Amino acid sequence: MKIILAKSAGFCFGVKRATTMAFAAAENRDQICSFGPIIHSPQVVQRLADKGVTVVDDIDAIEDAAVIIRSHGVEAGDLDRIQNRGLEIIDATCPFVKKAQNHAALLASEGYVVVVVGEAEHPEVQGIVSYAAGCQAHVVAGRDDAEKLPRATKIGIVAQTTQSYENFKQVVDACLGRCQELRVFNTICDATNVRQAEAKAIAAAVEVMLVVGGYNSANTTRLASICRDIQPRTHHIETTDEILQEWFVDVKTVGVTAGASTPHWIIEQVVDRLTECGG
């Protein structure tokens, strides 16, 4: 059985930067926490916990500790509250997420109705929306939501960094007919486009596809959905414990990709397990 591993599988720039900052910060601080999980990988969060990094969701519960800002960023008001308490901040927000936040703030300041293309419950999206203070902001998942938006004179659009370009473009097309002026910032991370294009190519060339990453990871879940549309025998897994030998009976080719929050050591474990299954 041939194993085809995506070249781009695993940590993106922003996640690698955030985890490097978190592990380095943990080495020389007695009291340290992260406001929310640093990335959407339970295994990495556990390794940080072993280094003394606790995950907190309530700012008021933080005592005298350094605070790591997760790669997805936080809401503007939360950041202000942490700063006002005089706590040390280690800002591991992905620079691409920060750019989306800044664009949302700019659009709001210039009187646009801000539309964020993404998942309303995702912390990155909630953070972006918080920067569009003082204006009407909407979160849309796709074209159907966009077509229900109220008409406005000026609409400005940004995207959750892990959105697919196709979905983003459909929202932009839908908004064109709902305003007199449209301003668009394509805030999708290049790494997302590369991963999705690579995943599509591999899924089309194999009999079974594995997508590795946290179930709470938006970009991993989207990769799995994209692959499943092409290859129905796609399995989204977090660890090797979920791999079943029966998936590979009479299979000659299997593809592997991983989300941007998936550490390389988990990908290596998956490849080793596939080798045991006949890869």
Image (spheres, helix red, strand yellow):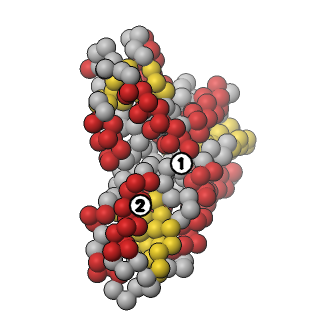
Which of discs 2 and 1 lies nearer the camera? The answer is 2
Tell me which numbered mark, 2 or 1, is placed earlier along the sequence: 1
User: Residue 86: x, y in percent?
Assistant: 41, 10
Q: Amino acid at mark 2?
A: Glu
Q: Is residue 72 above or below residue 130?
A: below
Q: Which residue is depicted at the point 38% across and 56% down?
A: 266
Can residue 25 be seen here? The reply is: yes
Q: Is residue 194 above or below residue 35?
A: below
Q: Is residue 25 left or right of residue 195?
A: left
Nearer to us in this view, 92 or 183:
92
Residue carrying label 1: 12
Q: Which residue is depicted at the point 58% across and 72% down?
A: 201
Q: Amino acid at mark 1?
A: Cys
Image quadrant where residue 116 sits: top right
Can residue 75 be seen here? The reply is: no
User: Residue 163: x, y in percent?
Assistant: 54, 52
- Give the CA separation, mark 2 to mark 1: 16 Å
User: Residue 130: x, y in percent?
Assistant: 49, 30
User: Which element is circle 1 on?
Assistant: loop
Residue carrying label 2: 268
Nearer to us in this view, 106 or 272:
272
User: Which element is circle 2 on?
Assistant: helix
Q: Is residue 10 above or below residue 84?
A: below
Density class for disc 1 (Cα within 10 Å; few <14, some 14-19, many ≥20) is: many
Residue placed furthest toward the bottom:
250
Q: Is residue 55 above or below residue 80?
A: below
Q: Which residue is depicted at the point 41% across and 33% down?
A: 23
Nearer to us in this view, 63 or 169:
63
